[in-house]
Image: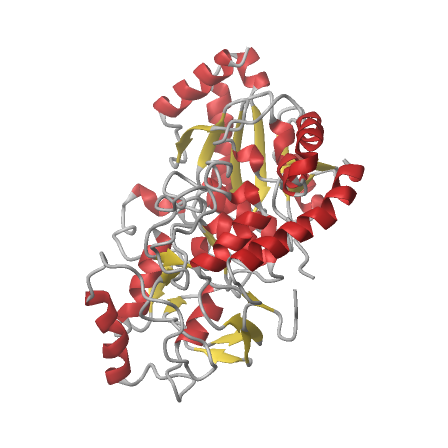
Amino acid sequence: MMHLPLPTLPRRFAVRAACHRALLLLCLGVAGLAGAAGPLPSDSIYHLDLPLHDQDGRAFTLASGQGRPQLVSMFYTSCQFVCPRLIDTVRDVQRALPADSARQLHVLLVTLDPARDDSAALRGVAAQRHLDARTWTLARSDSAGTRALAALLGVQYRILPSGDINHSTVLILLDRQGRVVAQSTRLGVPDPAFVARVASTVAAAD
Amino acid sequence: MHACRRKALPALLLGLLLGAGSAVVQAADYVPVPAGSLRSVLVSDADPGPVAVASYAMRATPVTRAEYAAFLAAQPQWQRETAPLVFASPGYLAHWGAAADAGASASLTAPVTEVSWFAAKAFCASEGGRLPSWVEWEYAAAADATRADARDDPAWLARILGWYGRPADGPLPAVGGAANFYGVHDLHGVVWEWVDDFNALLVDADSRAGDDPDRLKFCGAGAISFKDRANYAVLMRIALLSSLKAADSTSSLGFRCVRAEGATP
């Protein structure tokens, strides 16, 4: 008999999948409890049940970002040029915000290279770049999860035989429910319109 | 939650049987595709040589509307009304009747289209498979009826290119056209198909070079370029796939699955 794995679906989604009509009400109740802060909007990227580990090796889920605004992007630690500039650019966005707003804005960078970027590698970048762990999370998923997150964020990437990764870089602003509010592909001096959206989204999340 | 899952399982399996029964769907046929190497039409400066391809088993035909209807009956969270927008934007199953109704008038043996990448992935997982990588798809699609790689034959290239001149407004034909060298059907001539790494194709066909600030979007070695410009039919697929987002769907984009050779669901 057919087995029905649901590897990339969020927990609430998976619970619903396992429910038959007769148990639907019970199961919906259980599914509701599994959500951290109420039902997600249909266009929230937090529907993706993505297993992640942070730079200290702690497991968390994408949906645990629910409740505060977040900047999300993808990078990899052995990248020499664009990825260091990505961190610089995020810092410039933070500096352009009032201090208390900057503290409320979380930054999640997920590696495109989970095979080589283990927690120690991520921790190394966090230390080298003096990234405040209260604000910054550097994370890794598995290979399929990385592909799915990139697909969701519109990030294109291709791992070359040399180990280099061709990838597009985009900085994505999520609201507290995980909806994409704005995105920017500009590195270096941040796009003022993007910074303004970050500021208004943080203010709205108060 | 555990109790719920345990109790739900037999009911779920029953639902699956009923769903499959009502749509008269048999287990999908997968055919083996042996390992080899491929001159991909995609090449980058850092990756110029042939690509090694491991063996796999590929669905002999694209997933049909009947098969997709059975999947929706078994996994109602993928029905049009319930699938989150983030996984399936509004074009998803837009021309289906009710939630899981493939439609009486439409041919149930035609390939399913209007499905997103996330939905296609979930379908493949439901039968113990996954979406093929681009290279796996291209490798199988390089074959004609008698040769594993017919791409040096201009007559064959012209024949598959002929499909693209056909008007796209008529109903899709049923799956089950002529088998290729491996016993795989309909890789050309019926629908476009999702691949797992559709967001890895990184076509550098426009002017993202020189002083264009978009150049900074690319990290690492040089961008991908086309190696075999004569193979327009395949290049058009890459152009289409590169333009899509994972929640998108179109009326001419379907999919098939692959799995490890010898695997069963």
Which of the colour schemes (rainbow, by chain, secondary structure, one colour) is used? secondary structure
Number of numbered labels in the structure image: 0
Camera-side residue: B194 or B9?
B9
Give the answer, above or below, for where B252 lies relative to A170.
Answer: below
Camera-side residue: B201 or A44?
A44
Q: Name the spot of residue B41 as percent of width and height, x first.
A: 36, 71
Give residue B107's quadrant in the image.
bottom left
Q: Quadrant of the N terminus of chain A?
A: bottom right
A151 left or right, relative to A32: left
Give the answer, above or below, for where B58 lies relative to B203.
Answer: below
Task: Determine the residue located farthest toward the bottom in the rendered image.
Answer: B146
Q: Is residue B121 visible?
A: no
Q: Residue at x 60, y 54 (%)?
A: B18
Q: Name the spot of residue A66 as percent of width and height, x first.
A: 60, 25
Q: Name the spot of residue B91 as percent of width and height, x first.
A: 36, 42
B165 left or right, relative to B140: left
Give the answer, above or below, for where B157 lies relative to B221.
Answer: below
Q: Name the spot of residue B15 as percent of width and height, x first.
A: 63, 50
Task: Determine the residue located farthest toward the right in the rendered image.
Answer: B3
Q: Residue at x 53, y 66 (%)?
A: A161
Q: Quadrant of the C terminus of chain A?
A: top right
A75 left or right, relative to B93: right
Q: Residue at x 51, y 31 (%)?
A: A44
Give residue A192's quadrant in the image.
top left
Q: Is residue B58 visible?
A: yes
